[in-house]
Structure formats: C-alpha cells, structure tokens
Image (tube, rainbow, N blue to C red):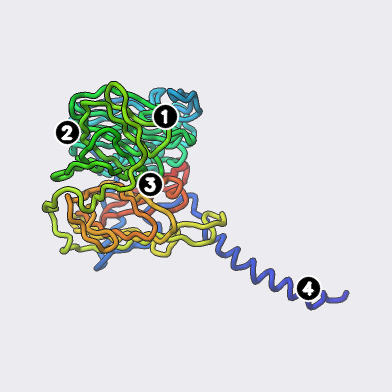
Amino acid sequence: MRPPPRRVLIGIVATIAILAPLGFFWQRSLVPNDLSPMAMGYADYGGPVSAHAHHGTDVSQLTGPADGKPDVAVEFVARKERFEIPGRGSIDGYTLNHTSPGPRIVAKQGDLVQVTLRNENVADGITLHWHGVDVPNAEDGVAGVTQDAVPPGKSYVYRFVAKDAGTYWYHSHQVSHEQVQKGLYGVLIVQPTATDVVAAVHTYDKVRTVNGEYGERRVKAPGPLTRLRLINTDNGPMPIWVDGASYKVVAVDGTDVDAPTEVSGKAVLVTAGGRVDLEIPTTKAVRIGLGGGPTTLVIGDGDAPAGTEPRDRVDLLTYGASKPLGFDPAKATRAFRYDIGRRIGFFDGKPGLWWTINGHQYPDVPMFVVSEGDIVRMTIKNSSGQVHPMHLHGHHIVVLSRDGVRATGSPWWTDSLNVEDKETYEVAFVADNPGIWMDHCHNLPHAAQGLVTHLMYTGVTTNHHLGGDPNNQPE
C-alpha cells in the first residue's frame, strides 16, 4: 500500500494544527454545571491580601429578623400563563397573582416586610430580588448564591426591614433575561407620599408599557405638585422628559437629591434598573415622555402637550448642591478596577463575541474581596463597544468622577449606573453589608452572556451552587 501523497499529509497536519487549538479553547470555555461561587475566578483584594476564610459565616445566617409580626405581609403565586396588556391584547408570559407587573408593595420606613413566594408552574424555578434595597444577604434572592431557585410546588419566605425610604422594584433573579422580560417584576415603594404617581416602564416582546398598559395612559393629578416615581425595568437606558411643565429631580435610585434645581427643556436618562423621582407642577395636564413611541403617561385632566425628546440632558454629576458623604474616599483601603471589554472566542462552547472583565471571561473573572468596614474605590471602564448599566447588589455607590471630571453636585448615590462605551467612572462605597453580592450588567442578556462577577466579604461563605440539581441560573 502506497503512503498518502505529501500534500495530503501536509493538509492533515495543517488541519490538526488549526483544530487542536480551537478544541482546546472550546473545552476551556465550557461553564461547569455545578459551580460554587466560592471557587469561581480569582480573588482580587484591591490592596494588601486579606485572610479570605472560606469557612466562616454562611449566607443563610445573614437574614432579616426571624421573629416578630410583619408590618407588611404579602403572598405571591408565580405562574406561567397568558395575560392581558390593556391597550394591546394578550401575551404568553409570567405573572404574580395573575398580574404583571405583580402587586405593588407599599411600606413605611422601618416596617418589617414579609413576602411569601410560591411557584405554581414556572418550570425553571424562581426567586425574587429586591432591586436597590440593601437587604441582608440571605434575603437578596439570587439563585445559586443566596438561595436555590424555588421549584414548582414549593415556596420561599423573604423577611427584611424597609430601612431606607425610596423608589425600588423587585424581579426574578433566576433565568432573569427571560423571566423579567416576560413579566416577573413589580414595584416596591418605601415611605410613599400623598403626591405620588408611579410609572413602571416595561417592554414585553417589543411592546413598551407603563404600569403594564400600552399607549397613552392617564392618571389624575394628586394635587398641584406631583411626585413622579419612575422605574426603568428594561434592559437599556431610557430618556424621560416632561411636556407642559418644568420639574425637579428630587431622588435618584431611592436617595434624595440635595437642593434640586428647576429643570426645563431637558431630559433625564434613566438606565436599566434605575429610578428617578421628579417633582412636577400639575395644575395643568402634563405628559411624561417615556423614551419616545406611543406609550406616554398624562397626569391631570384635559389636553397635554406632546413634544419630542429634548436634546439636552440633566447631568447628575453637577446637579444639586454638594454636601459631605459621611466617609472619606481618599482614605480608601481597597481600590479595584472593573474594565469591561469584548473579544472573539467561545463562551460555554458557543462561538461569538463575548464580554470580558479585566481581560478575563466568565467564570474566570475577578472576585472583589473586601472586609467589613473597608472604604472601597472602584474604577469602571467600558471599552466594549456597547453601553452597560452596572448594578451592585446590597450597596449604594457614590460617583466621584466621570472621564476624569470630578462630581460637584449633590452626592450622586446610585445602585444602577449607566456606563457608555469609552466612558470611565470612579465610584466609592463603604463595605457595610456582609455577604456575597452580585456585581453585574443589568442588561440581563449581557449578564446571561457572562458580564457578571461578585463582591465577596472575608469570612462569608455559601453552600449554594450555580447549576446543580436546582438548575440555578442567576444572571
């Protein structure tokens, strides 16, 4: 038998030379089906190495009050079912107590809130995360990190004190890119006022709604001044504006603005997951522009002007009056960088362009390690080509600068920060809420594609795993 021609051998060798590295990188990209957050990536201490004990306080011990009658007690039943969008028709999705958005939770500051969540038939399991509420870690509702996803036929109880007044929302943190978009979300208001109007903006299958309704929606003015509590539950940033009146930005992400000034002819950008409270004169009807399109909110009776999005925007870096932060970022004990990039390759065996954090791809990403009481500075840089709404659980951060320009307005406290491509933010916070906390992009498909890491406290551990039998998929 004659040996194969030389050119055939060269072809075989060339094919192996090409396929072998591809096979290696494909294999390396596979995300384990049973992965502990404690074993993910690599520890980044942002300074001197801390004693990172893997055997200490389990997150299951970091709960809200175990005893005491709740001031606010609600029960939710999650279902996969068909439901109605007023003004548009019915769609298939997910509901809580047969509605989407789910029932509104209203509490006074200091109330003990208890939510019992029961899964009737959501096959992938469910959780509830209290977006922007700095709850104890065990109440945070992140599948695979602070709890297991609740399977069909089972229930889970959350208990926490509503210690901070403000505008918040809740949503599933299991298979979030699907479950939230298809309906598992709702509004949480702590310390409401008599002048409140709530506007929760959500897009179901390309249909933008406000409070679950499509088209022009009208509400009565609660008085000569209205406090509009606007929540962006979508995956991308949204400009909002007021046609027919000036306004003030009185709160951002649940934190009051110091000395807000009157705004006219400008929009406010609300990032994914973010909230703003506006104070609006409503002696005449006004229209709230919700990013453009047919869905708007009219407050008051009679005709309301219909304008277009203003070109100028409120810059929260300079808006309002400066005041002390309560800590000194110059005395930071930890300094981290969170560089968001993108590169071609494989993610969980799929070829494409995938997100990176500090040059690493999930799950080989930095785990930011802190100790309780640390003052933390973090530089967030985006060179990925897309905007990212960055959300740190369990904490509020304060913006120190953007692209090297120092913040001079009211302290800009936020839990959902819009980071445009080629932008760099420097932020700071005090590590005062022990646990293991997700720090991720709130464009939820981006999180599902690996743009997620964790803030980990020394001496805190978890027995929950990503994947595994509960099929935890926190995103």
- Closer to viewer: mark 3 or mark 4: 3
Q: Residues within 10 Å of mark 3 (few under 14, many from 20)?
A: many
Q: Secondary structure at mark 4?
A: helix
The mark that comes first in sequence, 1 or 3, is 1
Q: Residues within 10 Å of mark 1 (few under 14, many from 20)?
A: many
Q: Which residue is mark 4?
A: 8
- Quarter of the image where the N terminus is located: bottom right
Q: Nearer the viewer, residue 175 or 27?
A: 175
The mark that comes first in sequence, 4 or 2, is 4
Q: Which residue is mark 1?
A: 119
The amino acid type of the residue labelled 4 equals Val
Assess whether mark 3 and mark 2 are in contact (beta carbons under 8 angstroms): no
76 relative to 321 in the view: left or right? right
Q: Residues within 10 Å of mark 2 (few under 14, many from 20)?
A: some
Is residue 91 visible in this depiction of the protein? yes
Q: Secondary structure at mark 1?
A: strand
Q: Which residue is mark 2?
A: 109
Assess whether mark 3 and mark 1 are in contact (beta carbons under 8 angstroms): no
Q: Residues within 10 Å of mark 4 (few under 14, many from 20)?
A: few
Q: Secondary structure at mark 2?
A: loop
Question: How far apart are the alpha carbons under marks 2 and 3?
Answer: 27 Å
Q: How many badges with numbers are in the image?
A: 4
The location of residue 142, given as percent across then percent down, is 36, 43
293 relative to 458 in the view: left or right? right
The location of residue 424, given as percent across then percent down, is 32, 60
Residue depicted at 44% across the width and 58% down the height: 385
223 up-or-down from 228: above or below: above
Q: Which residue is mark 3?
A: 442
Q: Nearer the viewer, residue 27 or 249?
A: 249
